[in-house]
């Protein structure tokens, strides 16, 4: 039986549910502030703000 766990958003401290099949570098969205969070550790689950994707413009 698999169960979801919950953790806290580092941006707004809302509760963020996580599925048991996630892995490091997975991206989840905070239901409170809609920010994208990257999982940086699994035991215990820790979040960091996901890096912004920057445009290259061929430079």
Image (cartoon, rainbow, N blue to C red):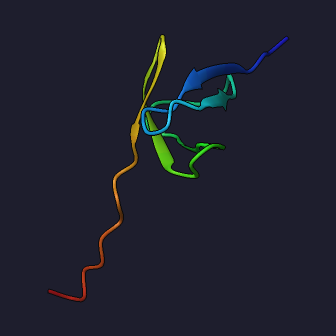
Quarter placement of the N terminus: top right
Q: Nearer the viewer, residue 8 or 46?
A: 8
* Residue 9 % position (x, y): 50, 32
Quarter placement of the C terminus: bottom left
* Residue 3 % position (x, y): 78, 16
The outermost residue toward the front is 12
Q: Residue at x 68, y 22 (%)?
A: 20
* Residue 56 % position (x, y): 25, 80
Q: Nearer the viewer, residue 31 or 40?
A: 31
Task: Say if 49 sits above or below 45 in the image.
Answer: below
Q: Residue at x 45, y 31 (%)?
A: 24
In the displayed structure image, the side of residue 21 where residue 8 appears, left or right: left
Q: Residue at x 40, y 48 (%)?
A: 50
Q: Nearer the viewer, residue 31 or 25?
A: 31
In the displayed structure image, the side of residue 1 where residue 54 appears, left or right: left
Task: Say if 14 sits above or below 45 in the image.
Answer: below
In the displayed structure image, the side of residue 3 where residue 10 appears, left or right: left
């Amino acid at each position: 039986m698999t169960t979801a766990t919950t953790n806290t958003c580092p941006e707004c401290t809302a509760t963020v549910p996580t599925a048991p099949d996630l892995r490091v570098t997975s991206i989840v969205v905070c239901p409170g502030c809609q920010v994208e969070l990257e999982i940086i550790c699994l035991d215990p689950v820790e979040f960091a703000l996901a890096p912004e994707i920057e445009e290259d413009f061929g430079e």
